[in-house]
Amino acid sequence: MRHYPGSSLSLSAVILVLCLLAPSLTMAQHETANGAGQVDRGQRVYGAYCANCHGVELEGAVGPTLAGARFLHNWAEKGADDLYYILRTTMPKPAVGSLSKAAYADVLAFILQRNGMATGKHAFDGSTEMLEEIDLTALAAASGPAPEAAPEFIPGERQAPIGKGPSQSELTTNGDPSNWLYHTGSYSGERYSPLSDISTANIGELQVACAYQVGRLETFYAGPIVYDGVIYITTPHVTAAIDASTCRQKWRKEWEPKDDMVWPNNRGVAVKDGYVVRGTADGYLVALDAEDGEMLWARQVAKAELGETITMPPLIFEDLIVIGPAGSENNIQGWIGAFRLSDGKQVWRFNTVPQAGEPGADTWAEVAGVPSGGGAVWTPMSLDAERGELYVAVTNPAPDLPAHLRPGKNLYTNAALALDVRTGKLRWYDQLVPSDFHDWDQTQVSPLIRATAAGKERNLLISAGKDGLLHAIDRDTHERLYKTEVTTRKNVDVPLTREGVEVCPGVLGGVQWNGPAYHPGTGLLYVPAVDWCFRFSLVADEDVRYVKGQNYLGGDVDAVGDWQGWLTAIDVKDGSIRWQYRSEMPLVAAVTTTGGGLVFTGEMTGDFLAFDAATGKERYRFNTGGGINGGISTYAVKGKQYIAVTSGGGTLTFGGGGSPTLFVFSLPVKK
């Protein structure tokens, strides 16, 4: 079995595999032939490579459950042939198809047997004949009645929050550096705090003030939100409020899924007027009371059966919650929407894959028998509240690799959108990767800054994505001013072939879910990135196959060579690189800058880092014991500066490991 850089991505990624099967697999009553031996082999493979994600008993952990009535009824609609096709063509991640044919068959046999299928005399060989004999409908019926449909709306016992703040004025002005009010610090997304008590002069004295263990084996991508001395964090199931200086839990709320958990990760909450709002992997918007965590309402706005899931942090403006679904690789028909803060009712919706008759629909040419879509959203937005202009990063089209099967520019995928935040009307857009054939999501639309660039002072939008490029765009003229490479770029324009083409960055390269930070004192942008190449291979057109709600690449991808990460400091004036830091593993954690002349970030090695913002000199390093892939926030309580760092939980693709834990750092009390 091939080994990938970083011990956590050897064959352990393999049946991490099933982590990305989303809705779930189903099987039917059929004898697995030579059952005992094959099932035993499948159990060993599962135990080695799947159990950490899906649980020893297939009950679900970091990944979804692979057993039970919901699992079975979902796949009964598709059939065993589709199930086996998805198993062998989309897994393991990132080395699709790297298992032997026998190993795929063994794992499927084990999962079927654990879902009630009898062990037979002949081993399952993956043949069409044997797949046709598997009656998933019968197996689902034997598991019990189909689960009830997920409710559209769940009211809370309390109609309005008793908690307070922040107000719209506080969110708009972001005037109190004691708080960290949005995922990227503020609507403008600079990820900069003027707090300066912790500085280049005393950073060596930094120490752990307290820690909070989430207590569930889940991914931990959240960006900590801080208001009035309280931190709000999330995992896929948990929302917790903790004291920002002591880490004592104030309240904790666990979400019990009402539908399939498509991709179980979550990047955090938004707060306003006593509301704490988050999305869930089964497509719900949930509003909690900031005072005690009491649920005020929950409304399903994304549909798991279509492959939609919510992973991004919401943005709240006035009485609107703005959010959209992830799932481009599942061929969703992407959108961004606004929902009423008081009850989650939809106010407006913008289709990022235009429907018939909408502007942009003519950029998708139809190829008979080949569905197309994508256009998901899964990373933070930004907002110019004065203009009422919302900026959204839209991701890739699907099928991901064979662009010739969806001719045209495929608007509005891989674009930075500017929408009227109150109506959802399109004001302007810039499609940075038209007709994408590398799964090169545009992931970032911040920071929004006023700075001198290309010879004059301008209002800038900084945009970056998985193509490994950072762009500076004039928000008034919509002119692209410059672009800077932040990862290796190789064979970016070479057409893909059946034999395969090595391309950099790969599907997991470039700028991921945390984007650039800005320091107004240095005039530098700080960009985290993943440097990792992949081999992209097409399949025959007749073999491109869509299964509703499942991965739809239309080809194969396989990791090539070693990975690394970069933190790149870029001069905002002209895009030139001032300094770089190389990490031995992908760099996906947030980057935060401060008035103390520091840049904070974290590594998948578990190290929390501080650099001199001007020179890039390393000033501080502390190992948290778990990979850092979420947010880093700084704030103050009673005048004392703190830094909150998410650690552990791992990722489905980059490893990291460790128990989800929030570390809070501060300077020691002077005696």
Image: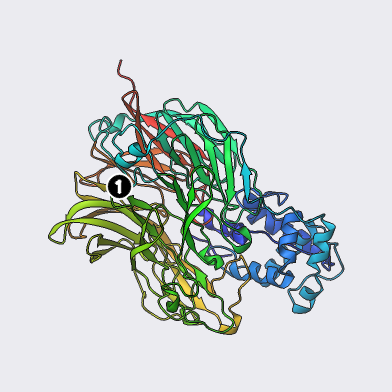
| Residue type, label 1 | Glu
| In the image: residue 1, left or right of residue 77 | left
Q: Secondary structure at mark 1?
A: loop
Residue at image coords 54%, 66%: 332
Q: Nearer the viewer, residue 611 or 409?
A: 409
Residue 519 point in image, percent of width and height: 24, 46
In the rendered image, the vertical position of residue 601 relative to residue 433, given as above or below:
above
Q: Residue furthest left?
A: 455
Q: What crowding class fits label 1: few (fewer than 14 Cα within 10 Å), some (14-19), or many (20 or more)?
A: many
Residue 632 point in image, percent of width and height: 39, 41
| In the image: residue 548, left or right of residue 584 | right
Quadrant assignment for the N terminus: bottom right
Residue 461 point in image, percent of width and height: 28, 57
Q: Quadrant of residue 464?
A: bottom left
Quadrant assignment for the C terminus: top left
Q: Which residue is mark 1?
A: 190
Residue at image coords 81%, 55%: 145
Residue 237 visible: no
